[in-house]
Amino acid sequence: MADWGVSRHPEWDMMYAAGLTVREIATWCHQHDNTVRLHLQVREGYWPGFRAAHEEALAARGPDRPTTGWRRRHSEAAAFVAEHGRLPDPGTCGERSLAAWITVQRLAYLRGELGARKIILMGELTGWNLSPHQARLDENWRQRFAELIDFVATNGRVPRWRNHQSEHERVLGVWLHKQHQARSEGTIPRWRHEALDAALPGWKSRT
């Protein structure tokens, strides 16, 4: 194996040997593809088996590795979520393409065809693996949860679903009672249970 120190770009050599493609190295190092490609071709003359080591490492990454184009779309999606606080809407002009890309990732995930590295990266986009219907249900839950916390902070008690003093209290009381029932039946999602436990230790519905 050639000494890394004799190379003008040892970091490119190590990335290539680790299985990264010329395009990925060029993108991450802000270089032109041909610049990286020519350098690596020269290095092959100094390191017998250089290309074979690269191809072996590339194959080990799996067929569904995040490509440069995939990472670019992921970065666009992450930037959108950071700016808007939500996933792109497939029904909104200007957001459809990105929404469609996320849908493709979700469907591949549900089929068990999305690579582990992609799943980890997609995890940065909250709700990406949920259907639009489930995402709306979760958003509605969070809204009711926020209203519940406000009610308790204002009134010093949880809302009642029978002996209520207002329609708003009744709605919140019924909602909390449903959470209580779901907990008893073991059907409440863990994250919802944990959110209620953290905000209202020992919570239960009141009549």
Image (spheres, rainbow, N blue to C red):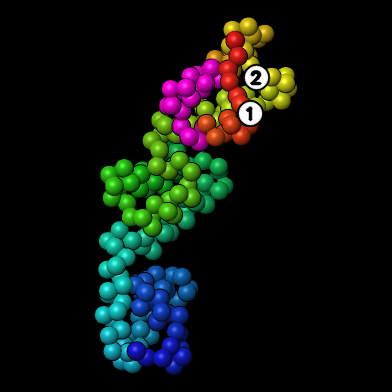
Q: Is mark 2 on a helix, strand or loop?
A: loop
Between 78 and 159, the residue placed more toward the observer is 159
**Which residue corresponds to mark 1?**
200
Residue farthest to the top, as pictured = 163
Quadrant for residue 69, please give it. bottom left
Mark 2 in CB contact with mark 1 (< 8 angstroms): yes
Q: Which amino acid does label 1 sit on?
A: Leu
Lower sequence index among marks 2 and 1 = 2
Q: Can residue 68 be seen in this view?
A: yes
Q: Is residue 180 magenta?
A: yes
Q: What stretch is highlighted in magenta?
A: 176-192
Badge 1: how crowded within 10 Å, few (<14), some, or many (20+)? some
Residue at 39% from the left image edge and 52% from the top image edge: 119
Q: Mark 2 points at which residue?
A: 158
Residue 22 falls left or right of residue 5: left
Given residues 77 and 158, the one toward you in this image is 158
The image quadrant that residue 74 belongs to is bottom left
Tell me if 141 is positioned left or right of 148 in this view. Answer: left
Residue shown at 42%/54% (left/top)?
120
The quarter of the picture where residue 54 lies is bottom left
Q: Which quadrant of the rendered structure holds the C terminus?
A: top right
What x and y, as percent, mark residue 12?
A: 42, 79
Numbered disc 1: secondary structure: loop
Determine whether 105 is above or below 57 in the image. Answer: above
